Amino acid sequence: MTGTKREPSAPDHGGGTGKINVRDAALVVLATVATIYFIDWAEAILLPLVVAVLVSYALDPVVSALERLRIPRAIGAALVLGSLIAAVSMASIPLQREAMAMLDKVPLATEKIKQIRASAALTGEEDMLEKAEKAVKEIESTAGKEEEEKSEPGVTPVRIVDDSFNLRSYLIRGSSSVLLLISQLFSVLLLVYFLLSIGKLYRRKVIRLSGPSFTRMRNAARIMSDFHYQVRRFLFVMLMGALFVGLVTWLAFLALGVEEAGLWGVAAGVASAIPYLGPFLVFIGCGLAAFLQFGTPDMAIIVAVVSLIITSIQGNLMTPWMTSKVSSLNTVSIFIGLLFWGWIWGPVGLIIATPILMITKSLCAHISNLRPVGELLGK
């Protein structure tokens, strides 16, 4: 009986898994590290670009509606951006008054804290701050004695004393950061205007560059439409959540008698766009403000818990229900994405982390080689 000779099969010790190519894995790791370094290094360029793209997605329906009314896109984009800036400026006028009123109460809050510490001293009880100050002084005195003991005889030890806080030097050091922030905001506005003016120009270019095949062009058009839909839906959900948190917080704080309730409502609404960190900061801030205003820990706890309940309803019930048909990201991937983009780009990274993950998962779902990554991100 004749036949081909079979090659002896290699023993399978890994339950059917293939061999790992160390060189390819090393290249993937190096490329990932280089990409992360580039994203961090090019923050001044990439961050305004990403924010401008997201904002243009949110405002594009309004500009498109004006275009259907025979208004050119360049004029419509200028009208939409001008109206938005004017609305924000007009809304910030009463908020500036409330913010100045809150700043005027800082000396009163400091005096109240001194009175609380004085009353604690009369009763013979030390608060945590006094104990911490005593501990620091004891550590400094012990370190000073050790330095004197280690110093050579006849040599006077020299101790360097830091200068007191200087507001002018602090403002000078922080002026560069302020100028960078202003330039980035101006860059975002210009990019938003240009993106709104050109309309679907780049979308058509991407579809045309996807290849001569009609199937590839159709897939590219499907991917771009999916991007637009998901980002717009997410931004709409985020806007609705911010309005809900801001309005309900304002009404609840008015009912509780909290001063500057409007300012706290706006702060809570804006902070709700930053997952986890924003609601936590509002929880701590409004609790401290309520304690300084009412002088009792009971009211501070009530105000803080009310703020926590409102943000919990928005974060755990309202937002997941509204995004259930759009986003299928699992909570672990969202949390890891928040950690990564928050580490790379700070608070703004926390805001844009979720739409970036949604776009990434949508892209992975349409590309066969990236489907395992989409499976890791999905539910």
Image (cartoon, grey):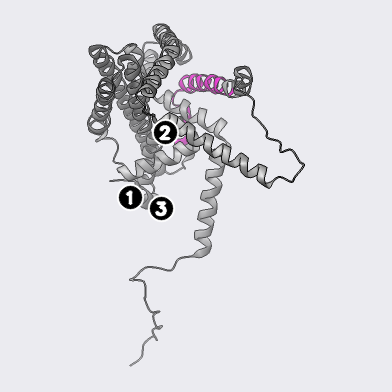
Q: Which residue is mark 2?
A: 350
**What predominant SS class does the magenta segment belong to?**
helix
For image coordinates 51% across by 31% down, the residue present is 47
- Start and end of the magenta stretch? 180-207
Is 189 one of the magenta-colored residues?
Answer: yes
For image coordinates 67% across by 42% down, the residue present is 148
State the mark number for residue 369. Answer: 3
Q: On the rendered image, what quadrant is the N terminus found in?
A: bottom left
The local crowd at label 3, few if under 14, some if 14 to 19, many if 20 or more residues have their Cα within 10 Å, is: few
Residue contact between numbered discs 3 and 2, judged by CB atoms under 8 Å: no
- Looking at the rendered structure, the secondary structure element under dot 1 is helix
Q: Residue 377: where, in percent of width, then height?
A: 34, 46
Q: Compared to 80, does 202 lie above or below?
A: below
Q: Compared to 23, does 166 lie above or below?
A: above
Instruction: Identify the mark nearer the N-term, 3 or 2.
Output: 2
- Looking at the rendered structure, the secondary structure element under dot 2 is helix
Q: In the rendered structure, which amino acid carries the disc numbered 2?
A: Leu
Q: Residue 137: where, in percent of width, then height?
A: 53, 34
Q: In the rendered structure, which amino acid carries the disc numbered 1?
A: Glu
Single out the mark in the foreground, 1 or 3: 1
Determine if residue 205 is in view: no
How many angstroms separate mark 1 from mark 3 (CA)? 12 Å
Q: In the rendered structure, which amino acid carries the disc numbered 3?
A: Asn
**Quadrant of residue 281 in the image?**
top left
State the mark number for residue 375. Answer: 1
